[in-house]
Amino acid sequence: MTAIFPNGQNSFKVCIFRQIKYSEHVMIKEKIPQLKKLSKKEKRILAGELWDEAMDIDDIELTDDQKKLLDERIEYAKAHPEEMIPWQSVKEDLTKKIQWLRLYY
């Protein structure tokens, strides 16, 4: 999977979210009272594990409009490579931010 993050005024991020009703979230949380006993660090680890399990890329179905938008963004990225941020730079920046968060949370 490739992430595309152009620089400048036309920057964007490609994100796909599945909608979850707030009431469903509350019901799940209430069903597992042990969650309240977890530390913040343990909750972050659990969130990551759940995210990894839930976000199997093969399970995500895109609408035709989403596919069209992604195709347009890929074509834009190919046509304007000077506006793109290399994945390695994005990864390094995120790693630094995560390390900073671990120090303070």
Image: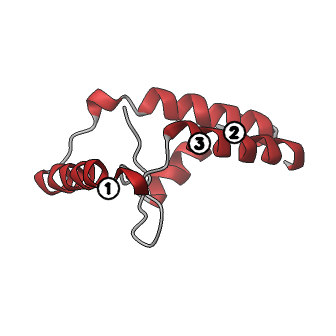
Can residue 80 be seen?
A: yes
Residue flagged by tag 2: what amino acid is it?
Answer: Thr
Mark 3 neighbour density, 10 Å: few (under 14) some (14–19) many (20 or more): few
Using the image as rendered, state which of residue 84 and residue 12 is in the foreground: 84
Residue position for label 2? 95
Q: Nearer the viewer, mark 2 or mark 3?
A: 3
Using the image as rendered, state which of residue 49 and residue 32 is in the foreground: 49
Mark 1 neighbour density, 10 Å: few (under 14) some (14–19) many (20 or more): few
Horizontal side of 12 relative to 87 (left or right) equals left
Disc 3, SS: helix
Q: Position of residue 44 (x, y in %)?
A: 69, 39
| Residue drawn at 21 percent across, 51 percent down | 75
Going from N to C along the chain, the mark reached first, 3 or 1, is 1
Q: Nearer the viewer, mark 3 or mark 1?
A: 1
Residue position for label 1? 80
Residue flagged by tag 1: what amino acid is it?
Answer: His
Using the image as rendered, state which of residue 37 and residue 4 is in the foreground: 4
Residue flagged by tag 3: what amino acid is it?
Answer: Ser
Disc 2, SS: helix
Image quadrant assignment for residue 96: top right
